Image (cartoon, rainbow, N blue to C red):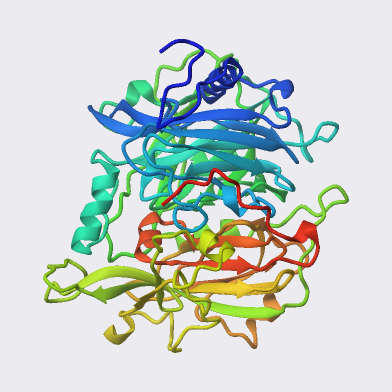
Amino acid sequence: MPLRQRPTMGGADKMPAGRLSWLLLGVVLAFGVAASPAQASRNTHYDFVIKETNVTRLCQEKTILAVNGQFPGPTIYARRDDVVIVNVYNQGNKNITLHWHGVDQPRNPWSDGPEYITQCPIQPGANFTYKIIFTEEEGTLWWHAHSDFDRATVHGAIVIHPKRGSVYPYTKPHKEMPIILGEWWNADVEQVLLESQRTGADVQISDANTINGQPGDFAPCSKNDTFRMLVEHGKTYLLRVINAGLTNEMFFAIAGHRLTVVSTDGRYLKPFTVDYIMISPGQTMNMLLEANHATNGSGDNNRYFMAASPFFTNIGLPVNDKNTTAILEYTDAPPSAGPPDYPVLPVINDTAAAAAYTSQLRSLVTKEHPIDVPMEVDEHMLVTISVNTLPCGANETCMGPGPGNNTRLAASLNNVSFVPPTVDILDAYYYSISGVYEPDFPNKPPFFFNFTAPNPTVEFQLTKRGTKVKVVEYGTVVEVVFQDTAILGAESHPMHLHGFSFYVVGRGFGNFDKDKDPATYNLVDPPYQNTVSVPTGGWAAMRFRAANPGVWFMHCHFDRHTVWGMDTVFIVKNGKTPGAQMMPRPPNMPKC
């Protein structure tokens, strides 16, 4: 291919030399070379070419979808209030979309990305340009595919620095490092999904957990490729931890070092210091690491494992319980002969450890970083979260739970198992196309029972399919209480809302009590997140002001639950002023 030419893809334009230079810059940044502040300029452009790439993990070569040949993909660098343009070229073999997780995208649902919610997918050979509008976000977010199980390999970090002239509200780190927790399947993830859809059974578990794309020292054929982070004694480092996994919440720790957590989901926290963190799929956590171990050969190791292990409580399901490791290595200390020290991590079902960590998340409230917790609520919603079953279709043999091979696994919110339409909901709303969705998602479950008591009766397992959305007026203050249920086993759920961050004002175990539990809310400094971990057998309450007009997906960030139907959509109507109304539809939206 000539150097100055963009590959031809279904009539795509040639690649200008300037675009190619940005592509090369993205490649450099993705491999961890420190970016100077000048590189994080306004209106940055990136070119993402999605195509099949061969990689080797766990002793075998495999073809995956990747961006610019990288797994994980390139890091996007920006500053607060920047606008970033990403040109996506689909040279892969399937439809795909990308989502900019945690970016509010004010008035711009057109670039949010979820397949058949805000756009039709980008077809093979086609291209689409996303406009990412940053406003109040500052810290770490991430981008990922939002179609099928593609995000298993199509994902990367988003680093948002303060505006020029502003500073971090903590010690400026010597260096920063994205730490992406993920999963690896030896099988083709597309086939894994298709097999689950064919049989109605659970999804095949992954073969390894990973840190920055590598399984670590204890996985077969992996030790030589374990990710290494090099540090110097006496310096401070910022770790930008992202849980990009499809299946598990994770504990994470570094042997011999405590971690000071300063941010989550692109929003600052009151700093607190811990031995481990618990991070859900979709979430990000920023933490400061002090490289404070002796380097004078006094007996300390110069290498320390950083490790992640699953947090999982539903004992009735199979789980990939493998730990994954990377290495923190002091470059100014004598090499040690023995293996790296290993951290102490909570056991896989340590709900108390997970809750103890999550309870420490509190917003940093300063003049420079104020918060605005809604004190009055216009619309209350109680949303039950369930894994369910549906009857097996005619002439099907299903492998869902229960005797007789006559059910398939499903999932629901308020007993509605969401069905994606064949025309995206945003276009249907924008053009008033009838029959695509129903605007009557319920504010409460259709029946009440002891949601969290073990082994509820079988009659509660069945759910109903529907494409139901929740329509709210612009400016409405919404409170959503997510209630876990024990149907087919209680477990925690990372619930993510597109288009908004929200204040997590309360959480607890058992059934939510609308008369008593609101008295325990934190309305002073609750964390401001885009993904909340709803406790196993418990509830979490969040509030947001619906001041972003558009169509916004809400779903569990366990991907099998998403495809099973644990989703809904908020449609926020336009406000009265031009600044409170959706941007016009771009002319180049993909076609279904």
Whether residue 215 is visible here, answered yes or no, is no
The one nearer the camera, 376 or 585, is 585
Picture residue at 41% right of the left edge, 56% below the top: 558
The one nearer the camera, 109 or 391, is 109
Whether residue 519 is visible here, answered yes or no, is yes
Give x and y (percent) for residue 104.
65, 52
Give x and y (percent) for residue 550.
63, 61
The answer to whether 466 appears left or right of 510 in the picture is left
The one nearer the camera, 6 or 66, is 6
The answer to whether 572 appears left or right of 408 in the picture is right
For the N terminus, the image quarter is: top left
Give x and y (percent) for residue 91.
38, 31
The answer to whether 553 appears left or right of 449 in the picture is right
Task: Identify the residue at the far right of this view.
Answer: 367
Q: Residue 551 lies in what quarter of the image?
A: bottom right
Picture residue at 55% right of the left edge, 79% below the top: 382
The one nearer the camera, 121 or 486, is 121
Relative to residue 143, is residue 46 depicted above or below? above
The answer to whether 450 appears left or right of 63 in the picture is right
Give x and y (percent) for residue 70.
43, 27
**Number of numbered discs overlaid on the protein picture:** 0
